Image: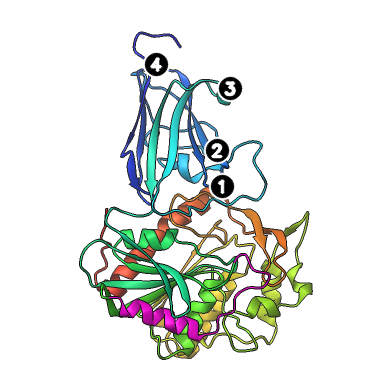
């Protein structure tokens, strides 16, 4: 591809939050020229992730990723953000990877490049490239480490004097402290405490006791930039079990609203919210295991039929948003959502529940444009045994679900924490 004016690749905006879209354009190509546009990211674990689409330039010698159709690659069709949501580990990578940003004070640095042709692009030198910054934390957001009264977590506070509505952010049974959703929520106007309540590296999970969560709520409400009467809870997977339990059984907490992603509503026979995984019989923990991949959906269906204690969700008096994927292979979350609604109906409170089921989406419903992690390495609670867990999901439907659900989550939180259905962008 020899020409007087070299190709130029531009990305606008080149610096943005991870839930914002960008436009990629390549100019100065020959008309009708086949090219591959590729994204490449090296994670904090030093693993490479990539996505790419095959395009043909128009009569002006231009390719616009947001307007033109990808003819092949990791995505097809007109997909403005396909270079992000269709990312997958580069060839030769380790198995079972999951891409999660750990340092909120630095951006994801993604290189977007264009190559000639539709084949063997990895062996070529790029015709043109641009570097994109993808941030979870907007300028002015405060990141505050919480090590107080036995509680461990990280509080993110939006720019400005406040007071702001706030959220307790609860992740799932893998344990550890995950900050990226809380940072993004703060970037959208909600203070958020990412709470560590299950240890990721100990021989046994940390079962802190229910007082731990009450104390965490007290810490959020006591912060001078938080509106103490406008605190909600957001949880994923096992985090939804905790969220539902806190709202149903702990009158001191009284969340303003709850967001549940991939619902779980069974609890420990010991009446604590952190020990349910320990009690699941071993014979159920391997139901559906095939080719060294654990499929827990059938186990969850079996638990639904057992006389196992459930969270008394009929006691909940605040609005709930239930979000699930129909291809969830980790837990029967759609069936659980139906059971939650049944229990709320029996309590005369069905009107408090908003439910959204996404066809083809899996268990790990993340902020928008996150790649699909259909199966990843996972540490089993208690044994800390490393397994491969099947989460489910189909790439394009899952991406659509993440984008749409994030809009719904922000609107839901805006309505019930701010009293305004229009989300405020905090850039």
Residue 197 seen from this side: yes
* C-alpha span from label 2 to label 4: 24 Å
Q: Residue at x 65, y 60 (%)?
A: 378
* C-alpha span from label 4 to label 1: 40 Å
Residue 374 sits above or below residue 335 on the image: above
Q: Secondary structure at mark 1?
A: loop
Region in magenta = 200-223
* C-alpha span from label 2 to label 3: 18 Å
| Location of mark 2 (residue) | 74
Q: Are marks 2 and 3 in contact (CB under 8 Å)?
A: no
| Location of mark 1 (residue) | 45
Nearer the N terminus, badge 2 or badge 4? 4
Residue 341 sits above or below residue 380 on the image: below
Nearer the viewer's eye, disc 2 or disc 4?
Answer: 2
| Location of mark 3 (residue) | 123
Q: Point out residue 228 in the picture as x, y percentages from the top left corner.
A: 29, 80
Nearer the viewer's eye, disc 2 or disc 3?
Answer: 3
Q: Point out residue 273 in the picture as x, y percentages from the top left corner.
A: 57, 82
Q: Point out residue 140 in the picture as x, y percentages from the top left corner.
A: 27, 56
Q: Secondary structure at mark 4?
A: loop
Nearer the N terminus, badge 1 or badge 3? 1
* C-alpha span from label 1 to label 3: 24 Å
């Amino acid at each position: 591809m020899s020409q007087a004016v070299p190709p130029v690749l531009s990305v606008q905006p080149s610096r943005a939050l991870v839930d914002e879209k960008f436009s990629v354009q390549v100019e100065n190509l020959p008309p009708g020229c086949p090219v591959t546009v590729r994204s490449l990211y090296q994670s904090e674990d030093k693993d490479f992730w990539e996505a790419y689409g095959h395009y043909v330039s128009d009569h002006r010698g231009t390719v616009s990723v947001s307007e033109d159709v990808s003819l092949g690659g990791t995505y097809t069709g007109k997909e403005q953000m396909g270079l992000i949501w269709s990312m997958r580990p580069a060839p030769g990578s380790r198995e079972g990877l999951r891409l999660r940003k750990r340092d909120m004070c630095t951006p994801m640095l993604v290189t977007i490049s264009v190559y000639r042709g539709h084949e063997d692009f990895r062996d070529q030198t790029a015709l043109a490239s641009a570097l994109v910054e993808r941030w979870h934390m907007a300028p002015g957001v405060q990141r505050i480490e919480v090590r107080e009264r036995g509680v461990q977590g990280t509080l993110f506070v939006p720019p400005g004097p406040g007071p702001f509505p706030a959220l307790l952010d609860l992740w799932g049974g893998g344990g550890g402290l995950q900050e990226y959703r809380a940072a993004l929520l703060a970037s959208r106007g909600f203070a958020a405490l990412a709470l560590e309540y299950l240890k990721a590296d100990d021989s046994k999970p940390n079962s802190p006791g229910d007082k731990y969560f009450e104390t965490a709520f007290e810490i959020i409400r006591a912060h001078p930039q938080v509106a103490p009467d406008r605190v909600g809870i957001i949880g994923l997977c096992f985090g939804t079990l905790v969220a539902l339990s806190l709202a149903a059984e702990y009158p001191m907490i009284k969340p303003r609203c709850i967001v549940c992603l991939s619902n779980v509503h069974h609890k420990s026979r010991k009446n604590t919210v952190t020990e349910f995984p320990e009690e699941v019989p071993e014979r159920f923990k391997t139901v559906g295991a095939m080719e060294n991949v654990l499929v827990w959906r059938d186990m969850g269906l079996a638990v639904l039929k057992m006389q196992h204690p459930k969270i008394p969700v009929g006691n909940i008096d605040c609005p709930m948003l239930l979000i699930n994927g129909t291809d969830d292979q980790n837990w029967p979350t759609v069936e659980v959502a139906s059971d939650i609604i049944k229990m709320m109906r029996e309590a005369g409170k069905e009107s408090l529940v908003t439910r959204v089921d996404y066809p083809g989406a899996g268990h790990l419903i993340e902020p928008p444009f996150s790649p699909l992690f259909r199966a990843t390495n996972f540490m089993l609670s208690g044994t800390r045994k490393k397994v491969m867990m099947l989460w489910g999901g189909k790439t394009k439907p899952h991406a659509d679900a993440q984008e749409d659900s994030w809009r719904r989550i922000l609107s839901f939180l805006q309505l019930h924490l701010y009293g305004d259905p229009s989300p405020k962008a905090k850039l």
